[in-house]
Amino acid sequence: MSVSIRDAGQEQLIVATGLYKSFGGEPILLDVGVEVFRGRILGIIGPGGVGKSLLMKMLAGLVEPDAGDVTVLGQSLQSLNASGLARVRDRMGFLFQNYALFDFMDVGQNIAFPLEQMGVPKAEITRRVAERLAEVELPGIERLFPNELAGGLKKRVALARATIAGAPILLYDDPTAGLDPVTSSKIFELIRRLHRPDGATVIVGHDIDRMVAVCDEWLLLHEGAVLFRGTTEEGRASSHEVLKTFFMETGMLGAAA
Amino acid sequence: MSSLAPTPATAEPQKRAKRPIPRQSKANRPLLYPLAAFRRGATLFLETLLWCIKPGALKRRRRQILEQLFVIGNKSVVFITVTLGVLGLISVFQVLVQVERILPDFSMIGPAFIQIMTREFAPTMAGLMIATRVGSGIAAEIGSMVVTEQVDALRMCNADPVDYLVMPRFVASVIQTTLLSIYGCVIGVASGFIAAGLFWNIPAGTFFNLQLVAYGDVVSGLMKAVAYGMAVPIVAAQAGLETSGGSEGVGTATTRAVVNASFSVVVLDFLLSGFSFLFLSKGPM
Ligand SMILES: Nc1ncnc2c1ncn2[C@@H]1O[C@H](COP(=O)(O)OP(=O)(O)OP(=O)(O)O)[C@@H](O)[C@H]1O
Ligand SMILES: [Mg+2]
């Protein structure tokens, strides 16, 4: 099933080039490039604090890079006005690492919010929210508030909100942090099911063992730069020291052996 | 530049290209901070106004506006009652102590007090109370939404934070500051009379006399109330939206909101008092 990404005729849904970002003079990302092809699932990995979340926010146009460009669906985010950006974001779903649930809304309202913004009729919203909550195995918790939920549950509610609109481009920042192994596997299963062949999915994560089953391609960030970019096989075959250590620690090489 | 072609399987680390030169903004120069902040505030103000006049906008945000009307009223009414009550009591008392030494007649105390209450003390004290109580609340709420990425989540759902968070607070604040200024004026004058009646036996008919209150005084007072009601939520929301650096950032933003909002009330008071002095008619009501 996995075709080499070098195949001709592949369409890029997200292209980022030369991304640079520093905070208070401290550079975090130096010249990072990302490309995500139609129909592919990209896994972004790297040590904590390397700037994975920052990179994801740049791909969604939430953080403006100091230098470099992000193009989504052929539109350069930097050059878009508010309504242009809105049209691109209509086609994106974003799961935030720290949930970012609206604390003044209950769970049902949180998940319904993207649909409300799109003007979906009320009855359909209620049905779809209940459906998606069942899919993340939290049926019937619509009336609870986010502050009544444990971290793992918040994550799943946030995942439901990110995916409710059925957007073709889905960005997940650490979808399984704080979840038990069984639920984690189910979440990755769901992520694969929600992935559209005409869309693209990006997953930031640390759970490489489980991500291997889902991701077609990888991007390893290290010290602010892209250290490796390629398919799972290419990653396993690599002889690069840091890459080896990183994948060994996380079991990916072990899986290959 | 990292090439767009996929890295070969035997991936060597991509050569770190020489650092691109980041786009630098002039606002990074300390001397221009206040100027740049003022410009961002003005932009936020215009954006908020645009959201307000958008057809159907007020109706669409009716629930949030009502909620904010309640929150702002609830937060401020006790404060304003106490502050203007005490202010009215003390200022009339102090004035009468002084006046007693030079004038035999107290008949003008009431009218003069009502005039200065209307055009100056009621709106400005209410404005300052709202700057602290409401300004800090707005900055803390919006600031914590920023650091918990809720504002980013709104953006991802194509809900403009200005439309969704700032506009309802702005509308509610303009309405409530005006109402609370009028209420504060009544409280201030009433408690002023308590001092006058209790300690100097000035009759109510003499004290509650509107002969000095000109049309210009009322307009001036209302104009100030509306201006403070507009400035406070904008200044506070700007501090909130510019929050950075986790929960300490929210504290800093809240402090900045209170300082800047109070400061803008004082500056607006000065400007609008000047305007009223120069341009508003002194004729009787
Ligand atoms: N708004 C900001 N202001 C200042 N520094 C920031 C900001 N956003 C990110 N950083 C810094 O950028 C660095 C990268 O942060 P980021 O959250 O992207 O890391 P990460 O790779 O997602 O880490 P983790 O694996 O723990 O999620 C951190 O050192 C962080 O302090
Ligand atoms: Mg992160």
Image: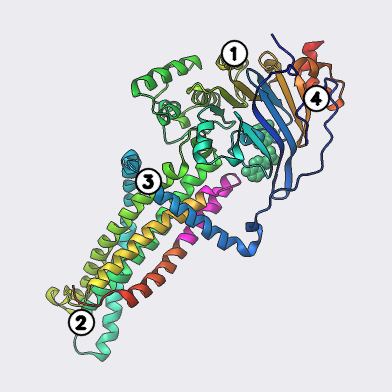
Kindly state the secondary structure of the residue where label 1 is placed. Answer: helix
* Residue A162 seen in this snapshot: yes
* Residue A49 seen in this snapshot: no
Query: Is residue B272 highlighted in magenta?
Result: no
Mark 2, other Cα within 10 Å: few <14 / some 14–19 / many ≥20: few
Magenta segment range?
A: B241-261
How far is disc 4 from disc 1 in space, using C-alphas?
28 Å
The quarter in which the C terminus of chain B is drawn is: bottom left
Q: Which residue is mark 2?
A: B108
* Mark 3 residue type: Pro
Kindly state the secondary structure of the residue where label 4 is placed. Answer: loop
Q: How is the image coloured?
A: rainbow
Q: Which residue is mark 1?
A: A189
Q: Residue at x 68, y 13 (%)?
A: A213
The quarter in which the N terminus of chain B is drawn is: top right
Q: For the residues tagged 4 and 1, is the chain the same?
A: no
Q: Which residue is mark 4?
A: B7
> Which secondary structure dominates the residues rendered in magenta?
helix
Mark 1, other Cα within 10 Å: few <14 / some 14–19 / many ≥20: some
